[in-house]
Image: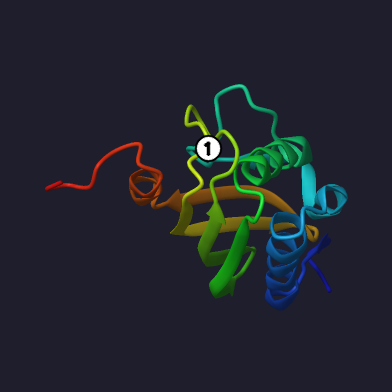
Amino acid sequence: MREKGCTTISTEANKAIIVQLYEEVWNQGDLDLVDKLVAPNAVDHDPQIPPGAPGGPQGLKAVVTMRRRAFPDDHHTIEDLIAEGDKVVARLTHSGTHLGAFLDLPPTGKHISTTSIHIFRFSDGQLVEHWASRDDLSLLQQLGAISAPGR
């Protein structure tokens, strides 16, 4: 669809891209697909991304690779997917077994399950911005890196 000289993609098409991102890239490890889904100049505002990390497709490939090394059975379940305009919001459950180094933590063998909310902005059918809010406290408690209050 064309509108005022620029291409707009339907909210349903944007939601389909997010489903593809989680099912094929995150859950199955298809890193080649990242180049199609993520714009070369995409910006990731995720607080877990280290300063100086690459943006665009290379940045996402690095994060997926790191997470899949730490959690080889890494799986993201989309609980909710909401779209309006050029943005899609996804509420996810992430689960996996900690079998590789993650951050500064050696493998624990523990199974984790956490939740997160992500906001994606699209332009011309590609992801151009990403924001995330995760339950990192729960993740660190499940891995035994910090204790739960009162324990």
Residue in the foreground of this view, choosing between 77 and 106: 106
Q: Which residue is mark 1?
A: 107
Neighbor class of circle 1 (other Cα within 10 Å; few <14, some 14-19, many 20+) is some
Q: Is residue 45 left or right of residue 136?
A: right
Residue placed farthest to the bottom in the image?
12
Disc 1 element: loop
**Residue type, numbered disc 1:** Pro
Q: Residue at x 52, y 42 (%)?
A: 46
| Quadrant occupied by the N terminus | bottom right
Q: Is residue 79 left or right of residue 150?
A: right
Q: Quadrant of residue 6?
A: bottom right
**Where is residue 9 shown, x and y percent of the image?**
77, 69
**Where is residue 99 shown, x and y percent of the image?**
58, 43
Residue placed farthest to the top in the image?
52
Q: Residue at x 77, y 41 (%)?
A: 57
Residue in the foreground of this view, choosing between 55 and 107: 107
Q: Residue at x 15, y 46 (%)?
A: 151
Residue in the foreground of this view, choosing between 115 and 103: 103
Q: Is residue 74 above or below residue 108?
A: below
Q: Residue at x 60, y 41 (%)?
A: 70
Q: Is residue 105 above or below residue 64?
A: above
Q: How many marks?
A: 1
Residue placed farthest to the front in the image?
109
**Where is residue 58 shown, x and y percent of the image?**
77, 36
Q: How is the image coloured?
A: rainbow
**Where is residue 33 shown, x and y percent of the image?**
85, 54
